[in-house]
Image: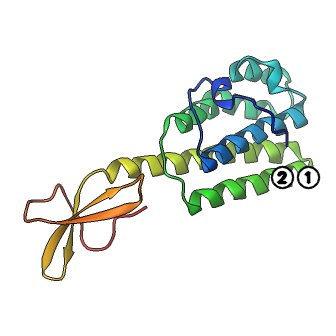
Amino acid sequence: MDKRNFDLWKFIGAEKSIDDGMQTSLTQLFKDYFESIKQFTGLDYDEFISVDEMITKGLQLNNSSVYFWSWLEKIGVKKLQEIAKAEFCIDDEFSDLIEYRRFILEQDIETGISHNLFESLADGIESCHKFVLTAWHKRELVKAKIMIPQKNRQVWAEFFSDDRQWITIPTKNTPLVKASGGCFYY
């Protein structure tokens, strides 16, 4: 795949600055998606100012990829922009998802069946969107302190999702959220 310095997030109309290794992997996966589109349709993303211009041209192709361009226009771009806005923690599960989507992309390119590629691209965007937004919402939820019953006493536990650490603080105060045992972790 082409690894040139293409600003994907600006191209789709979102602002995102990525320095983290896994988030860079996510960006590279989506860049590879656009590179595969170029390979299968001849539409080079470098020739367009925005994804909207590319979609307009893709819809004019009037071939088997039209359904993909229509999906990208109505649903896909919005999902990519939502991914760009979300702040989320990178973990092994997310790393596995990226590697799995990369494997599927490579297999689709190797087989050369365009409708499989376009279905996989849409599914890959959907999967990443679902994962990122689920992780983002969980991150928002864990900002609250929760109470965990422990051996005849109750303790506050506050989770800092950026550090991925629990801090336990004994207290007698009424909790904001009551946990029924176990660990609230994502």
Instruction: Pick whichever, 90 or 136, lies toward us.
Output: 90
Residue at 40% across, 52% down:
138
Q: Position of residue 178 (x, y in %)?
A: 20, 63
Secondary element under disc 2, as helix, strand or loop, is: helix
Residue at 86% across, 26% down:
43
Quadrant in the picture for the C terminus: bottom left
Residue at 81% across, 45% down:
117
Q: Is residue 139 above or below residue 42?
A: below
Q: Is residue 58 above or below residue 119?
A: above
Residue 57 in the figure: left or right of residue 16:
right
Q: Position of residue 32 (x, y in %)?
A: 78, 41
State the image quarter where residue 171 is shown: bottom left
Instruction: Pick whichever, 86 or 115, lies toward us.
Output: 86
Q: Position of residue 13 (x, y in %)?
A: 61, 23
Q: Is residue 162 above or below residue 147?
A: above
Residue at 39% across, 50% down:
139
Secondary element under disc 1, as helix, strand or loop, is: helix
Residue located beneath label 1 in the image: 110
Residue 166 in the figure: left or right of residue 131:
left
State the image quarter where residue 78 is shown: top right
Residue located beneath label 2 in the image: 106
Tag 2–tag 1 contact (CB < 8 Å) = yes
Residue type at mark 2 is Glu
